[in-house]
């Protein structure tokens, strides 16, 4: 007999509600959940095929250890004991800079990071590498400079804006906004609303747009500078906003005066007429913008991100209802000030963290360098650095070079195959609990207690528990008193988690707060064990320590009263409200709206600078913008070294999900491993559709069949990054990161420049 169970999609950060039909511990069917407050009966093709993610014939079932050229099954106890001994020896000899975490957690799978972070902090290391370090470095850094908060990039207030702008984003396919498809369709159909897309090619999203600005690949920063200069030339800027809410506008304004607007537009391939039309819309309508990888993986991603925020300021749409707003997240990431001497710079590359994350591209140089303080051991989960990060060859070399490399995953990957120890973790549909880090809804604040629907095969343990138990094995926390375990059991039996919480806090305080930073690990080991899921305990703990005001929760959920006695104690009522909000989401596997954002006082609440103003000028941008001129850019954009095309090294295409969808079953009826090329380019090269051609970059060369399509523009070709993943000994295609360079990083912060990879495309000369 089968049964339908509710759960949440883990395949992107949108957290759509899914219903899964389960029979004999197998997912046999997936459909969207009509009761989901997040997606309201919507899910995309990936969500629908989520069973392919779980159904993998290369599941990791037991802990394994590399012995010579093969792996041997070991027990969890042996794994912990050996890893702890090796890790502690390396730590003793080389200090905390020797240790890094790679991955840590995913957007939809945040519980793992909750214990991975303190696991790292406990030894004093700061090296946390996560996909944030390939995509969000520039925008997080820019938000940090302009409004003082690195973890609240802005999204369009789609319920109240008239114009929805997608800059370097193909949301119709990739989503990245809740229910993106219906949302874009509705905007595009509504005669009073508009969709504008800034993208060099006719993407699926651009095809729906009222205005498509086909900017030349790699010229966004120059275009943004020209656009702002044009607005100023016309006198269309929002003076009131700039003078009332912004600091240093007079200095930032100088960047746009005496600027050769027409020369710049020509380099960008945008006509003055279209630029003026765009500028007029920007300065007369309510608009919100979603930026994505076209910009974040672009040539000058930090500069472009910064200029986007500046454009919002000039038009008066920064942190304004109907404009660009910050969805409120349950957890926040810290601000990393790269000038603070306590914040580590990496010794070889000099790279620094943003919001606590380091750029992944720097990893190989920081592992392979011959300096004493290099990274020597890494713990990796929820990530596949051997493929996902730039330069697979170098990355593999670095991972092999580590003195200790521990990888956790639910399935065999190119990364787990390089590890010294491989630890099995359950897939998102098999966990006892988890929670989401990112939130995209606004003004509603949603929270989810993610629950699996089937049991993991073998001896899998949740990522959050593995980090906690590793910390215990390494002696990073002392033996915990029995009364904490008992209190946790009691909490599960009675539902009174607040009394348990008081005991944990009391124990930490008694020890002089030494273990304050390890609270999550202590909770995982006690409450997590009692609940049968560290992830579930983390879901609770994340809410308890959230900076979300409890007032906001009580307004929406007046019943969230929490512990009947302790809720009355001053100082504890906040925790009690949070605890009650947890109880609410725990009763609702589809998630629940637990609060509403305060839409009235956005600047007051979200600008973290003391003067509550947007700081528009900074010295790094002042320096970088100097060369952002038509002459310099025209020269820089010229193809050199035998290159004849710009390659988008990666494409977030319909059926794939980064490297997570390994089962080729999901590609059975079509083959999207193709080099997408414009018909006119193909004609010039003499290519026919389906012909196998050669693509070469400074890093490598691959053979790939051509797909001739008007979706690409002249001179710009695309290859998806979902291929070259081995499955049962075979790989379909080559992974695109064999063609990318780990040193091709944004100069200011370190995002990978994947959307701008010069390459040579040519016919294969048969010999
Ligand atoms: N189906 C599917 N959905 C996904 C994912 C997936 O793997 N598959 N992955 C998820 C993840 S992790 C992410 S980060 C998102 C990514 O989501 P997106 O960023 O929307 O994905 P991309 O396919 O990279 O689309 C980027 C767009 O930028 C354009 N572009 C390229 N170069 C330039 C340029 O120089 N300037 C401008 N203005 N535009 C440019 C490209 O033509 C492309 O249309 O997708 C998420 N959703
Ligand atoms: N060249 C190029 N490279 C790219 C991109 C590109 O466009 N071009 N896109 C980049 C982007 S935007 C991103 S976000 C990164 C993503 O890259 P990664 O961070 O490596 O993420 P994934 O490839 O999705 O999956 C990583 C691993 O996590 C495991 N995993 C996923 N979910 C679960 C789970 O619920 N439980 C357990 N135990 N394991 C799980 C999967 O099995 C997989 O092995 O890739 C980046 N790499
Ligand atoms: S948009 Fe698709 S992949 Fe993302 S959460 Fe929803 S169903 Fe899953
Ligand atoms: Mo991503």
Image: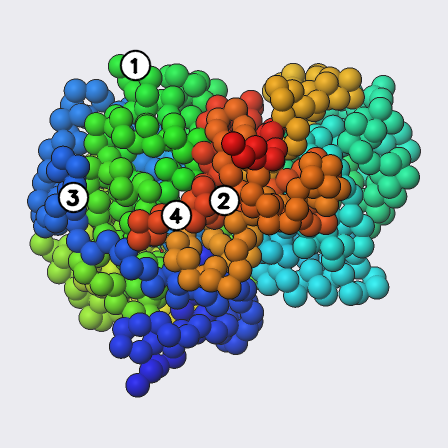
Q: Earlier in the sequence, mark 2 or mark 1?
A: 1
Q: Earlier in the sequence, mark 4 or mark 3?
A: 3
65 left or right, relative to 617: left
Q: Which residue is mark 1?
A: 370
Q: Secondary structure at mark 4?
A: strand
Cα distance, mark 4 to mark 1? Answer: 34 Å
Cα distance, mark 4 to mark 3? Answer: 21 Å
Callout 1: 10 Å neighbours few (<14), some, many (20+)? few
Residue 496 locus on image (x, y percent): 26, 66
Residue 601 locus on image (x, y percent): 64, 49
Cα distance, mark 4 to mark 2? Answer: 13 Å
Q: Which residue is mark 4?
A: 731
The quadrant in which the N terminus is found is: bottom left
Q: Secondary structure at mark 1?
A: loop
Tag on residue 721?
2
Q: Earlier in the sequence, mark 3 or mark 1?
A: 3
Tag on residue 628?
none
589 left or right, relative to 523: right
Q: Earlier in the sequence, mark 4 or mark 1?
A: 1
449 left or right, relative to 223: left
Residue 445 locus on image (x, y percent): 52, 59
Callout 3: 10 Å neighbours few (<14), some, many (20+)? some
| Dots 4, 2 in contact, CB < 8 A | no
Residue furthest top as drawn: 371
Cα distance, mark 2 to mark 1? Answer: 31 Å
Residue sitting nearer the eye, 304 or 581: 304
Q: Which residue is mark 3?
A: 71
Q: Is residue 229 above or below residue 674?
A: above
* Residue 760 in view in this figure: yes
Residue 34 locus on image (x, y percent): 52, 76
Residue furthest front as drawn: 767
Residue under the point 73% across and 41% down:
683
């Amino acid at each position: 007999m089968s049964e339908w169970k509710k759960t949440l999609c883990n395949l992107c950060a949108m957290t759509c509600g899914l219903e899964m039909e389960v029979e004999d511990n197998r997912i046999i069917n997936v459909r969207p959940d009509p009761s989901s407050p997040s997606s309201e009966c919507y899910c995309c093709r990936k969500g629908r095929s989520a069973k392919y993610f779980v159904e993998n014939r290369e599941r990791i079932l037991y802990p394994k250890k590399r012995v010579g050229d093969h792996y041997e099954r070991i027990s969890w106890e042996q794994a912990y004991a050996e890893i702890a001994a090796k890790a502690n020896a390396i730590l003793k000899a080389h200090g905390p800079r020797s240790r890094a975490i790679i991955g840590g957690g995913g957007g939809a799978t945040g519980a793992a990071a909750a214990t991975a972070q303190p696991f790292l902090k406990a030894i004093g290391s700061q090296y946390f590498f996560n996909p944030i370090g390939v995509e969000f470095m520039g925008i997080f850094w820019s938000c940090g400079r302009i409004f003082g908060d690195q973890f609240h990039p802005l999204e369009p207030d789609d319920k109240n804006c008239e114009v929805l702008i997608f800059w370097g984003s193909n949301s119709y396919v990739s989503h990245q906004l809740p229910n993106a498809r219906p949302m874009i369709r509705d905007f595009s159909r509504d005669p009073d609303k508009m969709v504008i897309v800034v993208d060099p090619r006719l993407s699926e999203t651009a095809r729906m747009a009222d205005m498509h600005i086909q900017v030349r690949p790699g010229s966004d920063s120059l275009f943004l500078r020209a656009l702002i200069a044009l607005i100023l030339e016309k006198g269309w800027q929002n003076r009131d906003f700039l003078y009332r809410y912004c600091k240093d506008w007079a200095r930032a304004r100088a960047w746009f005066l005496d600027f050769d607007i027409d020369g710049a537009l020509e380099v960008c391939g945008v006509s003055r007429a279209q630029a003026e039309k765009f500028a007029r819309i920007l300065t007369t309508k309510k608009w919100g913008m979603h930026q994505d990888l076209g910009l974040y993986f672009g040539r000058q991603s930090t500069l472009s991100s910064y200029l986007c925020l500046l454009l919002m300021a000039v038009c008066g749409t920064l942190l304004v209802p109907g404009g660009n707003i910050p969805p409120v997240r349950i957890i926040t990431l810290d601000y990393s000030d790269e000038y603070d001497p306590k914040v580590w710079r990496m010794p070889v590359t000099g790279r620094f963290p943003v919001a606590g994350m380091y750029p992944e591209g720097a990893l190989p140089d920081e592992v392979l360098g011959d300096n004493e303080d290099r990274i020597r051991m890494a713990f990796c989960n929820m990530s596949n650095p051997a493929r996902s990060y730039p330069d697979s060859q170098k990355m593999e070399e670095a991972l092999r070079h580590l003195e200790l490399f521990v990888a956790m995953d639910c399935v065999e990957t190119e990364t787990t195959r390089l590890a010294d120890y491989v630890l099995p973790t359950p897939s998102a549909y098999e966990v006892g609990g988890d929670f989401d880090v990112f939130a995209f809804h606004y003004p509603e604040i949603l929270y989810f207690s993610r629950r699996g629907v089937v049991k993991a095969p073998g001896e899998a343990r949740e990522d959050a528990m593995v980090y906690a138990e590793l910390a215990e094995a390494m002696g990073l926390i002392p033996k915990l008193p029995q009364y904490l375990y008992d209190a946790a059991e009691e909490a599960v039996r009675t539902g009174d988690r607040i009394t348990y919480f008081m005991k944990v806090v009391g124990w930490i305080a008694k020890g002089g707060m030494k273990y304050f930073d390890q609270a999550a690990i202590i909770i995982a080991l006690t409450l997590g064990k009692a609940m049968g899921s560290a992830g579930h305990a983390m879901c609770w703990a994340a809410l308890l320590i959230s900076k979300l005001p409890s007032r906001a929760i009580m307004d929406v959920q007046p019943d969230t009263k929490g512990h009947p006695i302790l809720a009355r104690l001053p100082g504890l009522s906040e925790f009690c409200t949070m605890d009650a909000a947890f109880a609410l989401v725990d009763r609702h596997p589809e998630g629940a709206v637990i609060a509403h954002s305060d839409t009235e006082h956005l600047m007051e609440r979200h600008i973290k600078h003391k003067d509550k103003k947007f700081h528009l000028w900074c010295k790094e941008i002042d320096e970088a913008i100097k060369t952002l001129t038509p002459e310099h850019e025209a020269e820089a954009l010229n193809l050199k070294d035998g290159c004849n095309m710009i390659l988008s090294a990666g494409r977030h295409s319909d059926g794939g999900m980064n490297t997570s969808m390994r089962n080729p079953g999901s590609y059975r009826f079509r083959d999207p491993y193709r080099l997408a090329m414009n018909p006119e380019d193909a004609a010039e090269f003499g290519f026919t559709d389906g012909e196998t051609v050669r693509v070469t970059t400074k890093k490598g060369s691959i053979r790939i069949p051509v797909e001739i399509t008007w979706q690409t523009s002249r001179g710009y070709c695309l290859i998806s990054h979902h291929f070259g993943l081995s499955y049962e000994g075979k790989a379909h295609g080559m992974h695109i990161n064999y063609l990318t360079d780990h040193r091709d990083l944004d100069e200011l912060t370190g995002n990978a420049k994947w959307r701008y990879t010069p390459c040579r495309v040519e016919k294969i000369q048969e010999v």
